Each structure stands twice: as structure tokens, then as C-alpha cells.
Amino acid sequence: MHGSGALLSSIFDAVPDAILGIRERDISFANHAVAAVFGWKIEELVGRSIRVLYRSDEEYEEIGRQFYPVLESQRTFDALFPCRHRSGKDIMCHVRVSRIGEDLQDKMIVATYRDVTEQWETDNRLKKTNEKLDRQVKACKSGLREAHARVETEIEKNRADGEKLQRLEEQQTLIVNTAFETTCRDYDGNSHCLDYSSKPIRDAQGHVLMVLAEGRDITDRHEMEEIVRESEKNYRTIFDAVNDGIFIHDLKTGEILDVNLKALEIFGYRSKVEVQGMTVEAFSTNEPPYTAENALNFIHKAASEGPQLFSWQVKTRNGQTVWVEVSLKKASLKKRDCILAVVRDVTKRKRGEEEKRRLETQIQQTLKMEAIGTLAGGIAHDFNNLLMGIQGYTSLMLMSAEPGQSCYERLKSIEQQVLTGADLTKQLLGFARRGRYEVKTTDLNDLVRRTAEMFGRTKKDIHIQEKYEEILWPVDVDPGQIEQALLNLFVNAWQAMPGGGTLSLETQNAILEEDYVKPHEIHGGAYVKLSVTDTGVGMDKQTCLRIFEPFFTTKEMSRGTGLGLAYTYGIIRGHGGMINVYSERGHGTTFNIYLPASGPAVSPGVKLRAELREGQETILLVDDENIIVEVTQEILEELGYRVLIARNGEEAVEIYGRDKGKIDLVILDMIMPGIGGGEVYDRLKEMNPGVKVILSSGYSINGEAMDILDRGVRVFLQKPFTATELSGRIREVLDEK
């Protein structure tokens, strides 16, 4: 009695769940964990109605209708119920109920309450977990069939053991005939339990003369044994009702002496017999730091220093890995030193935390790429302004030079170098999602197939495998931009396979959920997926995190600028899609591209004529960069135009308001301090709804520029531009009827 009572007290102290004894809807006893779960002290709860733990009378009555059948059937009952913390906060509890006592007047409910609010909320957010669990259940069917076969073998063995037991009982019957307990009544009618024995008295010839009977009153002992048996039964009921796994280990040998039902459930065992005698080695994954040796260190600390609490990774009977929280405490069972281990399965919570970390990493990566994109766009804008100065003066000198002159070819070389620099800034703007796209509805299968065929003709050492969705949803893309993005990926794959290899291309229709795409700042829905996989050298995790950054490269500086994949990233994001990468050292790389399914098509823009075109109209040139103003003014005047200059937005509005009747065209810079190009255009339009404007910028047409164009601006001119491009755009607008 004393041993089981002390052990039960130890379990009460060690279990983090609230345990309540309930009789006639009133709380009879509670453990200390009620403070952590519900915010009540033990002395405040005992004697109160259990109603105090629930949110409303209606919920309380509904819970009662589910709980009280337990009293009649003496079964264990598990359910999730909303409860109320003392502070008034709503919590979700996992409740397990069991009955104690045989006498209907004495029956009691033992209920354990676990606060699973956080887990319950996480489960609601991670809907896919159930699907994974379903697949795991299916995978376990074969294991269950094997277990069933072992159970049948065990039943056959038990049948043989039963025959042995029957023979043993026959032998015991002979003993009971001479020594047995019996019940009798005394003179007053009181019942007594006697330890009764009889012995024959024989004569010299061996004949029985009489039988000597002796009885000893053991009523007190019998009653005490009955109390102990009832106590042990109640202990077992509570032991199995607790919603955490409990192991009792022999401190000296480390062997398991006893476990409860929840422990069997967590570790996938069917009976206590299977685990009795096992040690921690049987459950250890032995992956550092989750080794059996380290687990034993915690056990020794619990024995010598006091209770221990830690997280651990263990393996189940079928080899699956689960996460548990373990609470260790020294206890005593029948004068034997033991370790009481309370184990809680936190696998779902751990997976939720890992998913949360994955999402946070993805969001951080997206934000970093956005910041880099903003920086890249700013650099490209400023660099385009510098190139505009060089290009402008080169154009002016070419206008007065003749082919064959010594300076003419040099000027053409300078112009070519400017164009090369402009191409680099276009790639930077592409990464920053500010490239110009001419969108039309496209069959991605056809585009990928044609691009792969073109690439394959130049790279004979690469074997290309193609697997295309038969009926692929159309996408609205700029075919030229997507082709460039694909070529960048193909070249990257070729460089990762210096000795040759296989390039695999696959397209699929895909429905992406909102939660999955949210970190990428796009919306869930219908997408077309393209996978580009190589058999190359692969990359480590850190390289994968930086692969889309501008100027980041794992190759020698002489082999490229490091803009290829950054450009690809910008193109895909600019089309409202996303791109991710998976790679391992020595196992190749896969890029997955997702593009939104089809929307309305957009017509391509008008192409420019190639010759210089002159005029005599008046043009208002608005720009805050001196070099841009000076060189553009010279070009315009060489072409025959009269030029007015405004070096900021306020000045532009003032000049136009004064001379709007004389001004035929405005060339307007988009980015200026103070009033920007968009606001200037809106003010000019208020003064003259038919104002003719060419928008010019070191940035390109997407984003803010596109918004201004949508409000009525005729043409966009990307810096740096040549005199030919400028003259053509001017005549395009001025000659428009």
C-alpha cells in the first residue's frame, strides 16, 4: 500500500497534465498541474463543480452527456473539448476519462486534461499533415499483417501454456483440500475469514482415528489485502488513464518494469509484455546527440541530482522516428529504486516548427532578393544616365562625321560598347523586375521544345530528355524573355556538367495553395510548372541561397558576369511567377519554374524606323541630370527643333503653363526630386488634355512607368538612347493624328 501510494504521488508530481477526481460532478482531488493548465490552485478547485472549467452551461451539459456513459461501462473515453482558463482565456484541452470503483454509490471519474491549444491551432494551419499520415498508415499495413501473424503464434503458445496451467491448478486443489481459507459466522452473526487447516490423527495401524482442525481468524488481514488490491486497481486505472506515456525503469539494471497504454501507443507496441525487460538502447536512434549513452546520462542525473526534462528523438517499433519530451524522476516501487519516465509525443509540434522555420527562411530570402532587386534597379538607372551622356555625345559626333574618316570607326566602336553596357543594365533591370515585356498567350511546351532544340544543336555532349504535359494550360508571357531565361538555365546546367550529362525538361499543370506561395508574394491558383534538371556537380545549401543574386558566381571571373540566373529570376518574377532550386553536392540540380495560367493577350509594340528624322517643332525637355539635358538639347537642336529646358518638375509645370500654346511635345524624365514624372504629367494633362508626352527613364517600362503610360502617355524611351531612336520616337508622337 505504501509503495503504490508513493509511486502514485510521484506520478502525480511528474505528469504535466491536470488530473482531477470527479464524483457527482464535484472535484474530489487534483494534482499540482491544474495551476499550469487552468490557473487554479488545488485548494481552490477541490469541492467546486467541474462546471468552473468550461465556457458555458450548454457546452458543460453536452460534455456531461458524453462523459457520464463512461460511469456505466467503465471504459476509457478520449475527446477534444474547449475549456476556460481562470483568466477567462479560451483553451483547447485533450481530455481522457476513466472510472474508478465497483460500487455504484462509490464510483468516481478520473479525468486528465492536457492544454493542446497551440497544437490544435497548428493542426488547423497545416492541413496537409493528415494526408501524410494517411500515406504512413497505408505503408504500415504490411507491418500490421506481420504483427497479426505474430499474435496468432502467441495465441497458439498461450493455448499450450493453458494446458500446463490446468495441470498446475489440479495440483493446487490437492493442497487446498488440506489448507484453505473459509468464511464463517460467530455467535453474534458477524462474518469472519479463517485460515483453516486439517490434519488426520492415525492409530498404530495407520487408520484415521480423528481429524484435527485448526482455524485462525485472518479477517483484518483479509480486509487489508482487499484494500491493497482496490488501491492497486485504482492506481492501474489512473496509470493507464494518463495521456502521456509512462515508463518505470529499474534503476540498477535499466530494464523496463512497467508501462502504461499511452506509452505503447506512442512507440507502436501492442502489449506490455513486448517491452518489459527492454532498455533505452531499444528506442535510441543513435544519431548524435540522440544516443543511448546520452539518454543514460540524463537518467543518472535524475537519480543523483533530481528531476530532468529534455527533448529527444526516438524510434518506434516499426522504425519510424518521433520527437518526444521526456521528464525523469527517481521513485520507489516495492523497495526497489526506479526511474519514472513521463514521455510526451511532440512530433506534430516539431514538424510544425520546422515548417514555420522553412516559411520564415523563404520569406527572409524573398525579402533579401527584393532588397537586392531594388538596389540593382537603382544602379542600372544611374548607370543608364551615365551611358546616355556617352551615347549622346557619340551620336552628335557621328552626325558630323563621314564614313571613312579616322574617327568614324572609333566612334562606332564607342557606340557599340555603350550598347554592351546597356545590355548589362537591361539584365539588372530584368532581375529587378523592371524589364519591358511584350506579352502574348503562349504554349510553353512549344517554346521549351524549340529552345531546347536550338540549345542542343550547339551542345552535342548534353543528352536532353523531354517529358511534356499532353494538354498544358496556356500562359501569358513574353516569348523572347522566357526563351532568354531558359537559355540561361540551360547554359548553367551545361557548365555544371563539364564531362557531359543529361538535361531533363518536364512540364506539368499545377494548382498551388495560398499558404505555399504566400512567402513568394504571389497568389494561389492555376500555374504551369517547368522543371529543369541536370546531372551535374550540384551545390551546397549556402550556394543555393545565393544563386539568384546579381554578380554571384561559382565560376572564374573570366567566364561570366554572374547575371544569368539573376536575370532569369527577375524575368520569372516579372511575369508573376516564382522559381526555386533544389540541389545536393554530387547529385545534380533542379530548377522549378511556376508561371500563372493564361490571361488576356497583349499586342506587341510598334517598331522604330532606323533613319534620323528631323523637325522644326518646339520641345520642352524635362530632366534633373545636367549631362542628359546638355547632350539631348544638342541632339534636338541638330535635328532642327526649338528646345525649352526644365530641370525639375515644378519648373516644367511653370514653363508649360506659360507657353503651352507654343509647346508641341514634352520629353519627361520619370524620376526627379520633388515632383516626379507621374505627377508632372497629371498636371500638364489638367492644363491640356491633349498634351503630347514622351516618358524617358533609366528604369524601364514596368512598374511606375507602365502606370503613367496607362494614363495616356504616348511613348516610353529607355535611356541610353541613340539619336536615331530619339528622332524616330519624336516623329512617331508628333505625326500622330
Image: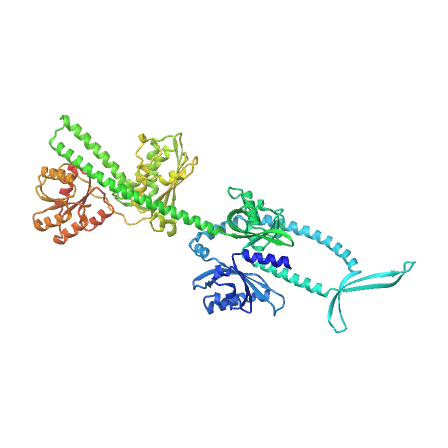
Report the side of 372 relative to 216 (left or right). Answer: left
Indicate whether 33 appears above or below 450: below
In the displayed structure, does residue 414 sit left or right of residue 160? left
Q: Which of 47 and 500 is in front in this view?
A: 47
- In the figure, 46 relative to 525: above or below? below
The residue at the far front in this view is 305
Q: In which quarter of the image is the N terminus?
A: bottom right
Who is closer to the viewer here, 525 or 21?
21
Residue 735 seen anywhere in this rendered image of the structure: no
Q: How many labels sit on residues?
A: 0
How far across and down, in percent of the image, does residue 609 sit?
17, 38
Is 86 situated left or right of 318 in this image?
left
Q: Nearer the viewer, residue 447 or 487?
A: 487
Residue 277 is left or right of residue 122, and the answer is right
Instruction: Write down the quadrant of residue 575 in the picture.
Output: top left
What x and y, as percent, mark residue 273? 63, 51
Q: Can residue 91 be seen in this view?
A: yes
What x and y, as percent, mark residue 705?
Answer: 22, 47
